[in-house]
Image: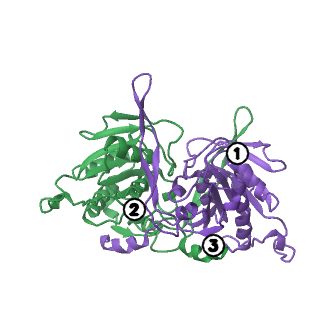
Chain colours: A green, B purple
Amino acid sequence: MYPMKKKTITHPEKSKKNTRVKEKPVILITNDDGITAPGIRSLVESVRDIGKIVVVAPDKAQSGMGHAITIGQPLRLHKVQMFDGIESWSCTGTPVDCVKLAVDKVLHRKPDLCLSGINHGANHSINVIYSGTMSAALEAAIESIPSAGFSLQDYSIDADFSGARKYARIIVEQMLRTKMEKHTVLNVNVPSIPETLLRGIKICRQAYAKYEEDFIERKDPHGKHYYWLTGEFVNFDKGKDTDVWALANNYVSVVPVQFDLTHYGMKDKLKTWEK
Amino acid sequence: MYPMKKKTITHPEKSKKNTRVKEKPVILITNDDGITAPGIRSLVESVRDIGKIVVVAPDKAQSGMGHAITIGQPLRLHKVQMFDGIESWSCTGTPVDCVKLAVDKVLHRKPDLCLSGINHGANHSINVIYSGTMSAALEAAIESIPSAGFSLQDYSIDADFSGARKYARIIVEQMLRTKMEKHTVLNVNVPSIPETLLRGIKICRQAYAKYEEDFIERKDPHGKHYYWLTGEFVNFDKGKDTDVWALANNYVSVVPVQFDLTHYGMKDKLKTWEK
């Protein structure tokens, strides 16, 4: 179905035995908190010896941008010095723009892996749809680039990334060893607890949970109303195979995510509408 | 799983026989091209006698915004006179913000239906992920509100919406008659051909197709580079049950869409990572 040339990705430790890949994999790293966020630094540090790392990330925070792309405005790329010895670019666009620009104008090829994060704040359950971090990774999956988004369940700028860092590396090594299915991205979330208390990886499904919106209403100095989005997270899903359950039970949750949104059961049911 | 009270939605023509619903359904209408776009006017006109219509739509074009929400800035709502006799609000936020604000601050309840569009330009295949039109409708589905996004395969401001208008009405009437599954949204696309040539409705799956990016590179008057996103649409999917096939064959495509992105096949395969 997909007419690209096949490319074999091999773990670099095995590359001597396999003559098809001689160089380290090219790993594109991005995020949605911006290139200066501590989380992306943790991700770079956790995998920097595994591959040839190139960073293309937003120049400012882009949380909640979902799968937004920039159509009506031009984009800029600036080469920056952020991570010692790592080629890095800041981009004026969204996380998805970063992946598109990286492939077309920075790498001039598809990377062997795309990693996004580590996000400051969890992206479990329905957050996969709102999250710029996950949308960047999903964009890579649309391009048939094996990818993963990483998030830590702590919004703080001073969050302790040591556990997330450890598991990001474990999972990237697994990805390089495993034949990943095309068009699949991993949504990895790490509980905010000391590294020693993490109980390992749980492969999960996306929980059905959502935010109960409650906009705060204020008046500006001219008497006009404005609204701030706030909301309470509510989990409606009692399943023990969900990402929300895994995080609450001190596991690192891994949800394999795909982008065919068709509801196949409903598709059959609606056939009577054809006439 | 979802602890809300059940509500029965009945087609208004049948409501005399059914005492459970006495009033016309409340229909929220939004879009991503902005409240002044001809497409949303066509949608309002096509269904205005079916329900009590309330419009909450962006005050400017928001194409390509995907599922973006506004976190870091306040939002404004302005009551406007756009459609004769229809309560209408323009909103400074994204399409998804419009749905959230409409439920919480305009309607103070969930509408019985949420309709988004009619979009200027198709939203078949992968566009479901980038499209603000579809994201607004998907947001409603997350809230268990039956919803649909409508798009016409013509970007022009002067596009002929007569066929799209006709089918929007047919589909809304079907939705009111059918027990729609919770958390499902319909992605409806209409080919840009004369109404008389439309061959009817096809229930489809989302095609695997994508854009091959090709950023146009320019220099500003100060010699610095900037990039414009362009791309060629490429369909890799030969299936005759896809939305792309249906549109190419003069059918109105209807894809039922859901938001559990879990790749269940891959979930089983990755179980070996748990340890």
Q: Tag 1: residue type?
A: Ile
Q: Tag 3: residue type?
A: Glu
Residue drawn at (41%, 46%) of the image? A100
Residue A158 makes an appearance in the image:
no
Mark 3 surroundings: few (<14), some (14-19) or many (≥20) residues within 10 A: some
Q: For the N terminus of chain A, which image quadrant?
A: bottom left
Q: Which residue is mark 1?
A: B35
**Disc 2/disc 3 C-alpha distance (Å):** 27 Å
Residue B121 is left or right of residue A73, and the answer is right
Can you name the residue that lies furthest to the right here? Answer: B16
- Mark toward the viewer: 2 or 3: 2
Question: Helix or strand or loop: what does disc 2 sit on?
Answer: loop
**Viewer-closest of B266 and B35:** B35
Return the disc, 1 or 3, that comes first in the chain's sequence.
1
Q: Is residue B15 above or below residue A223?
A: below
- Which of the 4 image quadrants contains residue B196? bottom right
Q: Which residue is mark 2?
A: A183
Residue A49 is left or right of residue A241, and the answer is left
Labels 1 and 2 touching (C-beta < 8 A): no
**Disc 1/disc 3 C-alpha distance (Å):** 29 Å
**Viewer-closest of A26 and A134:** A26
Question: Helix or strand or loop: what does disc 1 sit on?
Answer: loop
Residue B155 pos. (x, y %): 60, 47
Residue drawn at (27%, 48%) of the image? A45
Q: Which residue is mark 3?
A: B181
Q: Which mark is residue A48?
A: none
Mark 2 surroundings: few (<14), some (14-19) or many (≥20) residues within 10 A: many
Tell me which chain the residue with mark 3 is part of. B
Residue B256 is left or right of residue A41, and the answer is right
Tell me which chain the residue with mark 2 is part of. A
Q: Are marks 1 and 3 on the same chain?
A: yes
